[in-house]
Amino acid sequence: MSKSQPGSKEEKGDQSVRANPFANKHDSSGGTIVRRSQDYSKTHKFWETQPVAQFKDIGDTSLPEGPIEPATPLSEFKQEPYILPDALEWTTCDMNSDDMCSQVYNFLKENYPDERSPFRVDYSRDFLRWALCPPRYHQSWHIGVRVKASKKLVAFISGVPARIKVRDVVVNMAKIDFLCVIKQYRSKGFAPILVKEVTRRVHLENIWQAAYTSLDILPTPFSSCQYWGRLLNPKKLIDVGYSELRQRMTMSRAVKLYKLPDAPITPGFREMERRDVPAVTRLLRKYLSQFGVATDFDEIDVEHWLLPRKDVVYSYLVETHDVITDFCSFYAVPFTISDNPKYTTVECAYSYYNVAETTSFPKLMNDVLIVSKKKGFDVFNALDVMHNKSFLKELKFDDPGDAAKLHYYLYNYHLRSALKPSELGLVLW
Ligand SMILES: CCCCCCCCCCCCCC(=O)SCCNC(=O)CCNC(=O)[C@H](O)C(C)(C)COP(=O)(O)OP(=O)(O)OC[C@H]1O[C@@H](n2cnc3c(N)ncnc32)[C@H](O)[C@@H]1OP(=O)(O)O
């Protein structure tokens, strides 16, 4: 094993370059501490009225596992949208329309990132279409609020359908994401109205559960995970302030420490193609069946979520004698940098679903690092979900320390006990 390879003895332990610990939920702050509510004693006026696990119930094992409230007969629940202030109106966003997709893109680009961070998440239009228009999606779950007079978007929330296996039960859920309100309308109670409206529209499709994530502690996470970051392009990341050199580390040592081979090492490692969908689905279903909460992928989902799409999602596999034995994938989220004379973006890859059956996890993921670097990514982030912990340290991912966590939530579903990240087979952004 060459010195620059992961796992080589001399380089384990003291990494001495700190990757941005706040890459969570694409809230990349590049060293700027962004305060987040991490408090289990806080009261939550809105969330305490919702069918979610409450703080007071933590540790109460007498509560049954499953839906908190039963499904309401369709005829009994609210058919009309929630009332907005007079100047505003609801709009359903057709992401297939280039104009509407651009409006949502620009709205999120401007309003989604934390303004205190010099690194601003910039989900591409293609990413948004991929994330919001999976098979069986409902356009009515792509919800905007705009000013009646100007038609300008001022708020957004979205849901997509997902089958999520909770223990042995597969539950039809909505994955809720991209909740966003323009700054002028913050702290005025708009977020609860958006949540209630998306809930209403999800109920109209006879779906009663949802999954979502947040950097804040709300009532009540069923799992709390952390992102680890692996520098691929340390020079650029240090130059732009995304990472910092620790004591005793020089730039040339950092470059050497994170150097990767030029090409994947595992024989039979190649990009996934459409013909691989059935085999990849089988591999994933078998792997994901062991986790307490996991995505329940069928072939149609795999085709959408995992077939490679340039600048959005990348998938690779290991094929030996016509048998697909291992699979790995990542998705792409760039961050824009303000005020840098040389660079305008940091290209981030995020680990998605990985299955190592024959190849070891570190070996498989080392090949993923190699291909992601080749594709021009600057950093590779991974949550500590599934078996990811088995490769993070060995492949020189930076320990997040006490950086903010990504908390996972279920709406209207009670789990008797919280899950460790390693019991989670679900990647949400
Ligand atoms: C069955 C179907 C069910 C479907 C629904 C399932 C639930 C889905 C839930 C949504 C999952 C979204 C997943 C993502 O997209 S997470 C991404 C969140 N978005 C951003 O970080 C973008 C930038 N930030 C903003 O645009 C605003 O700060 C937002 C819109 C986030 C809050 O706006 P604002 O700061 O102006 O707040 P408010 O005064 O109107 O309202 C205050 C209330 O809102 C609660 N709050 C604040 N942030 C979040 C949050 N991220 N998840 C859940 N609740 C949140 C807060 O605790 C408080 O309630 P309570 O503490 O008093 O009780």
Image (spheres, rainbow, N blue to C red):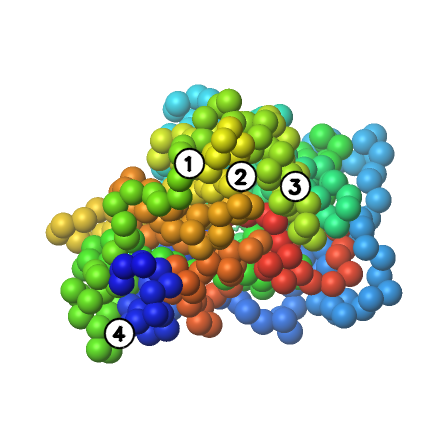
| Nearer mark to the viewer, of 1 and 3 | 1
Q: Which residue is mark 2?
A: 325
Which amino acid does the dot numbered 3 rest on?
Answer: Lys
Which amino acid does the dot numbered 4 rest on?
Answer: Arg
Q: Residues within 10 Å of mark 1 (few under 14, many from 20)?
A: some
Q: Which residue is mark 3?
A: 286
Q: Which mark is residue 246?
A: 4
Residue drawn at the location 62% of the way across and 54% of the way down: 424
Question: Dot 4 lies on which element?
Answer: loop
Q: Quadrant of residue 271?
A: top left
Q: Which residue is mark 1?
A: 268
**Residue 181 position within the rendered picture, expressed as x and y whole percent measured from the top left:** 48, 47
* Distance CA(mark 4)–CA(mark 2): 39 Å
Tell which circle, 3 or 2, labels the residue nearer the N-terminal end. Answer: 3
Tell which circle, 1 or 2, labels the residue nearer the N-terminal end. Answer: 1
Question: Dot 2 lies on which element?
Answer: strand
Question: Dot 1 lies on which element?
Answer: loop
| Nearer mark to the viewer, of 4 and 3 | 3
> Marks 3 and 2: CB-CB under 8 Å?
no
Q: Residues within 10 Å of mark 4 (few under 14, many from 20)?
A: few
Q: How many marks?
A: 4
